[in-house]
Amino acid sequence: MENRMRVELLIAVCALLLSGIASVASVYQAHVIAQQFSVTEQQFSATVWPYLTITTTGTATTIRASITNDGLGPAIIRSAAIGWDGKKDLTSWRDMVTTLVTSPRRSTQPTSLAFAGTTGSLDPGDVIRAGDSRLLLSLSGPDDFPETLVGNAVRHGLTVSVCYGSLLGTSWMETWRAQLPASTDLQYVEPREVHDCPAARGISD
């Protein structure tokens, strides 16, 4: 009888030990799967990552600006705005240019320049595919037209901010600020990931 109880106790201990090993193995397997899933998810995220940049070019009489998606996935525009003097938002490229060419060069000398060209809107819901560019504005004017625009843009702290998302719902905010001495450049700032984009709004043509 005593031997039989010892055998049964040994069997019970072995069963408990095997159960514990199985539990540990299951937990470890789940951990490995979770890590693999996380790596796979990160790899997939990288394949749909958008990356927007604004490029400007110009001559003595022309200025052109476009937005390009240099990333691997489509960029979904959530919000776009033009900042002026750190507080006022301009609602269209045409308003921006009109404001810039009529803004005083000095506190007492107003400047008004005639200009011609085309502009393009940037609205919430617009999609810029990987490798694609979109024209924002292409304008021409007198000899000092681009110089006047950029000089006034720098003086009034002009910024262009775009909040955009990927197919996975991740969002980024990118802001470009007018700068000198490059007469038609906007200062590049690395995009930062944001939890939510500002309220949906766009920049009309």
Image (cartoon, helix red, strand yellow):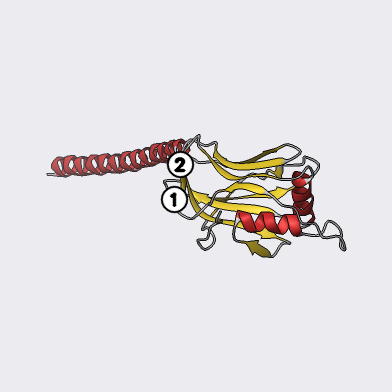
Q: Residue at horizontal 72%, vertical 45%?
A: 141
How far across and how far down the image is residue 93, in percent? 61, 54
How far across and how far down the image is residue 26, in percent? 31, 41
What amino acid is found at the position of numbered circle 1 in the picture?
A: Gly
Q: CA distance from mark 2 to mark 1?
A: 11 Å
* Mark 2 crowd level (few <14, some 14–19, many ≥20, 10 Å Cα): many
Q: Residue at horizontal 49%, vertical 51%?
A: 77
What amino acid is found at the position of numbered circle 2 in the picture?
A: Pro
For disc 2, the marked residue is 74
Seen from this angle, which residue lies furthest bottom? 87
Is residue 171 visible to the viewer in this orientation of the structure? no
- In this picture, residue 114 sits left or right of residue 28: right
Q: Residue at horizontal 77%, vertical 52%?
A: 154
Is residue 49 visible to the viewer in this orientation of the structure? yes
For mark 1, give the secondary structure.
Answer: loop
Q: Quadrant of residue 29?
A: top left
Check the image and report above or below for 96 versus 144.
below
For disc 1, the marked residue is 169
